Amino acid sequence: MTTDTFVLVVDDQPDLLDQVELTLVSAGYHVWTAKDGTQALQVLEAQPVDLILADISMPRMNGYQLYERVIQTPRWVAIPFLFLTARTLDSDVRYGKALGVDDYLTKPIEPEDLLAAVQGKLRRARQLAWSAEQMPAPVPPKPDTLSLGRLLIDFGQHRVRLSGQPIRLSAREFKLLECLARQANTVIPVQELIKNTHNLDTDRADASVLLRPLVRTLRRKLGYRAGEMGCIEAVRGVGYRLIPPHDG
């Protein structure tokens, strides 16, 4: 058994506390002990804890109250929590399970059964932690609107305003502007742009030919004269870059 696993045992009966501690230490665990929920919280604040094993009937703060404090604290909520108690009424068991506790063990319990429960809950907690680490980081949602100088783009509504005035764009013109705007001030290769506007995978030469008239009409609609790059700069041999248009 690994020697860096820490179990917190909470019980107001010294004999049972010593018995459980001895069983766990003999199996290779580090054990913290507390006589009630209040002391248990002090241990949690000061020491690493991988699993909590708690009685229910205790002075000052009982096991139910301790459990509620644990699950309300983000840094403790993932710690497996087991009740070990002499309260065996069906209503007590149902209440503990309804709270969401990981297991409900009844006294007296054989050392082998105690260790099996502890090992099982720790193994499950490690599996869940490992699975969470393997999940890809969530992709942040794209903004619904974007303000770039005099440009205001509403991606959800496919609307564009320049200095407060609406600009009517075709679907492909909007896709081109969106791709440039989401990466403003960055040179975007023509192949990437044509993939967005025409859904085509092609070489740079063909992509450039297809994009030129689209870029030209977009510039015109943004108020630039023929031959002016305006806010859509061409980077020879690479692609295009949107510079947020400002007054002046």
Image (cartoon, rainbow, N blue to C red):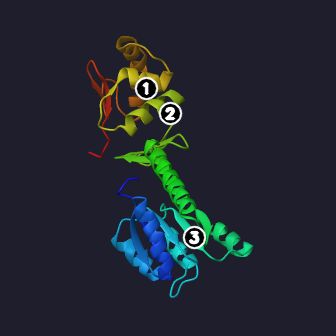
Query: Which residue appears at 50% of the width and 22% of the height?
Result: 199
Q: What residue type is labelled 3?
A: Phe
The residue where tag 1 is placed is 217
**Which dot, 1 or 3, sits closer to the camera?**
3
The residue where tag 3 is placed is 83
Q: Earlier in the sequence, mark 1 or mark 3?
A: 3
**Percent position (x, y) of residue 126?**
46, 51
Q: Which amino acid does label 2 sit on?
A: Leu
Q: What residue type is labelled 1?
A: Thr
Please state which of residues 65 and 176 is positioned toward the viewer in this rendering: 65
Secondary structure of the residue carrying tag 2 is loop
User: What label sits on residue 169 in the rendered view?
Assistant: 2
Secondary structure of the residue carrying tag 1 is helix
Check the image and name the residue furthest to the right.
90
**Percent position (x, y) of residue 152?**
43, 46
Q: In this view, does 40 lie above or below 4?
A: below
Secondary structure of the residue carrying tag 3 is strand
Residue 48, quarter of picture: bottom left
| Circle 2 residues within 10 Å: few <14, some 14–19, many ≥20 | some
Q: Earlier in the sequence, mark 3 or mark 2?
A: 3
Check the image and name the residue furthest to the bottom.
60
| Circle 3 residues within 10 Å: few <14, some 14–19, many ≥20 | many
Residue 18, quarter of picture: bottom left
